[in-house]
Amino acid sequence: MPGTSFNYAIFKRLQATFYADYGLGGGGHEGHMAADPAQLLGGFSLIYPDDPHGLVTGTLSSAASFAGLAPGSSPLAPVGDNTPNDSPLYQMLAQSIGPDGTVPITVNVAGQNWPVMPPPEQILPPPALGTQTNQLWIQFNTGNPPPLIDAFGQWLTAGRPDDSPKGAISQPTLAASPPASFPGAKTALLFVASFAGDDGRRFGDGEPQGVPLSHVPPDFWAHSQIFLCNAQGQVVMPAKLLAGAEYAVAAVIGNSGQGFAGRLLNPAYAVTAFADAQCFNTFMSPGVSLPSLGNLDPADISGAYEQFVMLAQSWDVAGFRFDVNSVFSQLAAKLDPAKLGGKSPAEWLKDGHPCVKVRMFGGELANFFPPSDPDPPNLDTNPRLNRHIAQRNLAPFDTALMAIKKPSWTDFILSQAGHGPNGLTIEPQNWPVNEVRFWFGLPHGFYERYVAKGGHRGFELVREGVPKPFPDCVMLRQTTPGARLMIEDHAREGYFGMALGIEADPVRLTHTRLGDVAVAHTAHDGRIVGGFSLRPQVPLRR
């Protein structure tokens, strides 16, 4: 994704333009968003990029004949022809910009007259918006960012790379199972999905029927619908984030209310989302804002992703740019080496998987089912209590690296949550207790100040015979499954480094279907405030 994102920056703006042209009646589907191909305006669909009658490889439906076009025609030039002017859609859009009275009704491309889009005012009955009154279209093509038309032309020249979400987060798949209706939400009710099938309801939000705290999984960081995608929009989970790689962070957002949201309807109900990458952690750590993939200028580092419209009971996907070199260098600059047990920040982050938090703002009525945790959400807001934030703390774990008496270590950052003692528990799913040992490691000074004084029931101190995750390290081996490691209030430190170790014989686990290993971080009252999960990725062989 070195250039402007096709899906998040170009396609979403084209979609918003023609929503504005043809309104939101008919359940939000009319004009180029008609669900029935026979009803598509001009036979062309903007529901999603690779619709059979859509932009990437589609052809016009039977409805094209009503516009004087040939069904089966393509809005783009044949594959391999990367000249923008050879694509009808590019000419249709490019001809729409001009003073009143100068915009033609049609443009001839390859012997066929195509309607200029957005069309000039004189052929449109009110309240439809034409090229001089469609404020979104005017904005998209003026100002400091590259004009949308230019970005579209550059995309054609580049060979039409398609980064729209695929598979489980493709628009057709999401649309097939819309969010369940939120009881009493007569207007928009927006959320970042913390689990598959999320409906936006949260404990304490004032919804009459109410839901328990368990409505959102306690290990929400492993279930949130936030993914890494490659340049083709496919969800990936690489074992390592290698230098020079770039991904899209794709976050599923939903509207389980009965109304629409977004600036397309009213500037007062603009919807934006932001994503922050943090060091792998259980709660908080130094972090960096990720650039929005909605920026027309790929060099723009603005983090605000705008969702121009959210239809009633619908899903969409917000996108952010994750450049591995940029993220890791910024995180390294913010880490204090004195808190990392003798490792440098670069060593600490090497091959790591940062935590990603996505927050959503705007689009709702004030005080409408308000979350019980701070809203608008802060980075430390709890996703189990606030629908406007979700986080992903999930990393692959190579089980083949484990060996008897040689734990495989994963570094993480620990920060104070609230006031008073915090706790860490290790929660393996389907790991045989007699075949595996778990460890925590932390720098000596932090151990003495925050762990040693209170003891560490369920953990024993191991001084020798085991490789350390970092030079200045106190190692604690778990002796009682489910034991909680208590850590005194350490707010004055801000954070410090720790490590989780897993020790086992891979051969003896060959026939065991291993689940995640989660570390849960609890506040003084036992409430889970965060954590992370490691997921086995490499099948074991004898």
Image (spheres, rainbow, N blue to C red):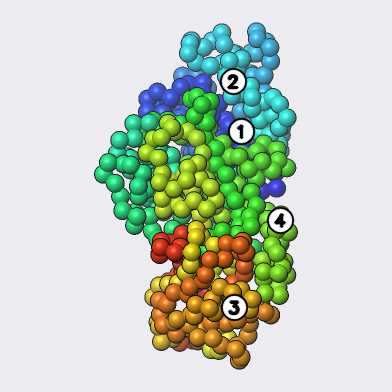
**Closer to the observer: label 3 or label 2?**
3
Of the image marks 1 and 2, the number of the one nearer the N terminus: 1
Q: Secondary structure at mark 2?
A: helix
Q: Identify the image quadrant of residue 343.
A: bottom right
Measured in 3D between alpha carbons, the distance from the residue under mark 4 to the one under mark 2, in whole angstroms, is 37 Å
Q: Amino acid at mark 2?
A: Gln
Q: Amino acid at mark 1?
A: Leu
Measured in 3D between alpha carbons, the distance from the residue under mark 1 to the one under mark 2, in whole angstroms, is 26 Å
The residue at which mark 3 appears reads as: 448
Q: Amino acid at mark 4?
A: Gln
Residue lying furthest left in this view? 209
Q: Taking the image as drawn, is residue 81 in sight?
A: no
Mark 1, other Cα within 10 Å: few <14 / some 14–19 / many ≥20: many
The residue at which mark 1 appears reads as: 76
Where does the image place residue 20, in percent across and percent down from the top left? Answer: 51, 23
Mark 3, other Cα within 10 Å: few <14 / some 14–19 / many ≥20: few
- Callout 1 touching callout 2 (CB < 8 Å): no
> Residue at 66% of width from left, 48% of height from top?
1
Pick the residue in front: 400 or 541.
400
Residue 431 drawn above or below residue 247: below
Pick the residue in front: 160 or 3.
3
Of the image marks 3 and 4, the number of the one nearer the N terminus: 4
Of the image marks 4 and 1, the number of the one nearer the N terminus: 1
Of the image marks 1 and 3, the number of the one nearer the N terminus: 1
Where does the image place residue 146, in percent across and percent down from the top left? Answer: 71, 32
Measured in 3D between alpha carbons, the distance from the residue under mark 1 to the one under mark 3, in whole angstroms, is 67 Å
Q: Secondary structure at mark 1?
A: loop
The residue at which mark 2 appears reads as: 135
Q: Secondary structure at mark 3?
A: helix
**Closer to the observer: label 3 or label 4?**
3
Where does the image place residue 6, in percent across and percent down from the top left? Answer: 62, 40
